[in-house]
Each structure stands twice: as structure tokens, then as C-alpha cells.
Amino acid sequence: MSTSSESGHKFHVSICGAGIAGLVLAITIGRYDPSIAIDLYEAHDSIDTTGVGITVWRQVHEVMIELGLFDEFKQIISHDSDSTRGPNTRRSDIREGGYPWFQKVHRYGPSGMHRQQMVAILERHLPASCTVHSRKRLVNYMEPEQHDSHSPSPVRLAFADDTTATTDVLIGADGIRSVVRKTMFETASKDNDNDKTDLKQYIDAIFTGMTVYRSLISAETLRKETPDNLSLKEMSAYLATYPIDKGTLINVGAIVSDPSLTGTQYEGHWVSDASHEQLVEYFDDFEPDARTVVKHTTQLCEKPTKWALHVVKPLPFCVRKRVALIGDACHAMAPHFGAGAGQAIEDAFVLGRLIAHPLTTLSRLPDALRIYEEIRLPFAHSVASLSLSTGWMYAFMAPGYYDGTRKEGDLDERGISAYEKEGMEALKQEILRRWDFMDESSGALRAWKDAESKLQALAD
């Protein structure tokens, strides 16, 4: 809880939030420069996580290999990371039975895992240079007193238990309701008298109009009732299902969308217990396999939960002086690409490598943070934007695209009209184009090489 001048370290890093982003950041810094002192502040009693299943892609596998963690991750993922596969997508909102729509085959397909198992592995690999402080809820921070951003004066942290701390650099990994983001944009708005941009609009996350009902159900139980249930074999929308825990559990996300609610104030808790009756009603017009999954979600899952999906508006910046935002604090996104955790991990790896680099001294910290922002923020914004708009496509609610209407007349042998086929084909092609963008992204290792080049250019 001290600065470099007080402790004798190169400099001192404080991370607010011990979720996936904060843990990966601490591990990365510790791996590449064990001399840097790290304080990891967690608001809860212990390092824990909300949510159930999580999807990761090739880019995350590459980071885990670099950090020496992949052998352990192989023990909890549901698919080999090198296997070619991808989600089968069906039109399921037809009560008598849906039909296959398309499959996106990825050269390196997604791997499902239990989020808590992932966090447990990361926690075990925290470096000796990292001190974890539980029950430390940040209230705000104060920027260095001098106006010179290269000044060695400390960032001052204030916590809910009336304690304080100082640090050389603060990283906000504190999630969608980030206190670090709130303080950053409140402070920036006071310095923004000549700019008409309302920076306070970026403090609070906004409601997407989408709600997801999440649960885990037993694959064995589902197999006994409907041995050929599609959820045992593939991923589907919108229900979205995929296996975790080596295929013994099925992660279920049942998504309900209402575009008229986008941007409105959500009343109630963002995460709450789900109403069984309401969930069954929402999916009563879906095909039999989907209704069976919903039934098991409501009858056999001990605590299905309802999540009001909120996102962070695209931030104009995520770095100010010696403070930076990563993960959900920076770009909380909709889940339709299964990319939120991956983007947080890529943030943490690139930023961690920059902080730990031999060229990054205390005076160069602001430069290193700005390079992180330049490399990571635009790409994360693109992923977040595409993910949200793709969700509306899956729900047949994307402006300018097929709206799901089924017409009589000119039907093929499956009862599908030419109008429906044409609309579904146009949607499919656009969704596949977006998935190609994700597949072709180079990931954190390439981003790190670009970041290192920029850092070296500054030193020349």
C-alpha cells in the first residue's frame, strides 16, 4: 500500500477488482517483472465470481500458453483447443418444430468452461509479489496533486472502511459498475469546461433491453429424457447452450429482447432469481427440444438467475494520467460473441506486459498506459458494438433485416416461404461476416508486439 519511493520497488501497482481481468493482470506483471509490488483489492470476503459458464477462443489459449497456465486450463475446458467446430444455429421459434439455419465452423473453435474453475486456477497462480486485500471496497481515488502527469506524486485511494492507501499506478478492473471509471469521468468532467461533451454520460452502464436467464442443467438428466436433444450436441440460439465441466453440465442462456427498453432505466436488481412461470411463458412457442431445456432449467436447476444485460457506452478514453481501465470496467459488452472475458484477458495481458517492460519506468508509466489505450480500446469497442447488434439479429429485431415474419404461400417442402428463405439467408451472411471478423483478429500476442514497438519508439 505504498509508493515506489517508500518501498524501494521499481514502482507500485494497485489493481481494483479481483475478477478475471484483475487476476490475469497481476499474473502477467508478476511473470515478467517480479520486482513490481502489486496490491490487489477485492470488495468481497474472498476471490469469487458471478456467472456460470464461460466461452474462450484461440486468442485466450495463446495468452494462457504464454503465461504457463494452459496445461491446467486443458483440464477444465470442454473441447480440445485445436479442434475445428462451431455453433449450429437453428430457427427454433416454431412450436411444432424448427429447422437448421446455419453452422459457423471455426478453425479453432470455442471452449466452454465453468467460470469459477477458471478463477480458481488464476488465483492459484498469483505471484508472490502480489498482496490480496479482501473486503476493500474502493470509494474513490485522488489524482496526483501536481498537474504534471509524469510527477512521482502518488495516486491516493479511499475505501469504504475509512482506510486509505497510495500507489504509483491504479488499474480499474472493478467491473461494469466501476468506481474507478466513475471517479475518472467525474474528475475529467471538471476539467472539461471548454468541451461540450458530457463526460458524465460514461459513468453509468446502460440497459440493452435484453434479459438473459442463466442456469446449469445436468447433461445426464437431459439425455435420459430426450437422448437426441440438440443442446447435448450443439450450440443454439436464442436459447444459447453449450457444455462445460467436461460435458457433464449444460450452460443455458435464454435471452429475451425488447428494443423499446434499450437505454431506459432498469427497475430492480440487475441480477435476481428467475421466475419459473415467466421463463416457461417466454419460450412456450419454441420447438420441443427448446421447451425441454427450459423445463429442466425451471424444474431441476436449483437457482436459475435473471440478468438484465447492461453495457458500457464506448468510452472516449480509458486512461487518465496514471490510472487505466480494463475489462468490463472499460467495455462491458453483450454476450452474443462469447467475447467479454476474452477481451478482458487480452486487455490484461497487453497492459501487464507494458507495465512490466524494462523500458517502463515511473516517469514513462503514462506513456505505457496511453499505448495500451491506443492498441486495445478501438478493437474492444468494435467487438462490443458487433456483439450487441448481432444479438438483435439473432432475435430477428435488427433494423433493416428480416424480422422473423412467416408468410403463407409459395412454401417449400419444409413449409418455408421464399420470403422467409431470402430474409434468413441475408441475416446468415451478415452474421457469418461478423464471425469472420472475430476469427481473423490477431489477438493479444500480436497486439503486444505492436505495443512493444510503440514503447521502444518512444525510448529511441
Image (cartoon, rainbow, N blue to C red):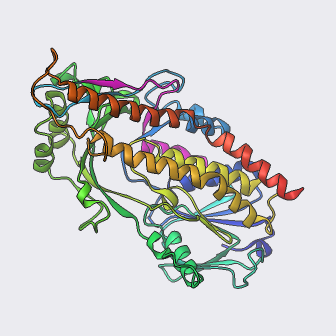
Q: Quadrant of the C terminus?
A: bottom right
Q: Where is residue 311 in the image (x, y as percent from the top left)?
A: 40, 58
Q: Position of residue 245 (x, y in %)?
A: 39, 33
Residue 237 position by quadrant: top left
Q: In this view, does 161 lie above or below 22?
A: below
Q: Nearer the viewer, residue 339 or 274?
A: 339
In this rendering, would 272 be left or right of 182? left
In this rendering, would 388 be left or right of 187? left
Q: Is residue 415 visible?
A: yes
Q: Which of 451 and 233 is in front in this view?
A: 451
Q: Give the range drawn in magenta.
A: 100-126
Q: Nearer the viewer, residue 86 or 303?
A: 86
In this rendering, would 96 be left or right of 245? left
In this rendering, would 303 be left or right of 22? left
Q: Can residue 219 be seen in this view?
A: no
Residue 427 position by quadrant: top left
Judged from this view, the residue extending furthest toward the top is 413
Q: Position of residue 293 (x, y in %)?
A: 20, 34
What residue do we see at 50% from left, 21% from top?
A: 83
Q: In this view, does 246 lie above or below 39?
A: above
Report if residue 24 lies within the magenta region. no
What residue do we see at 64% from left, 48% from top?
A: 349
Report if residue 113 lies within the magenta region. yes
Q: Is residue 163 above or below residue 256?
A: below
Q: In this view, does 113 lie above or below 460?
A: above
Q: Quadrant of the N terminus?
A: bottom right
Q: Where is residue 288 in the image (x, y as percent from the top left)?
A: 13, 28
Count the numbered circles shown: 0
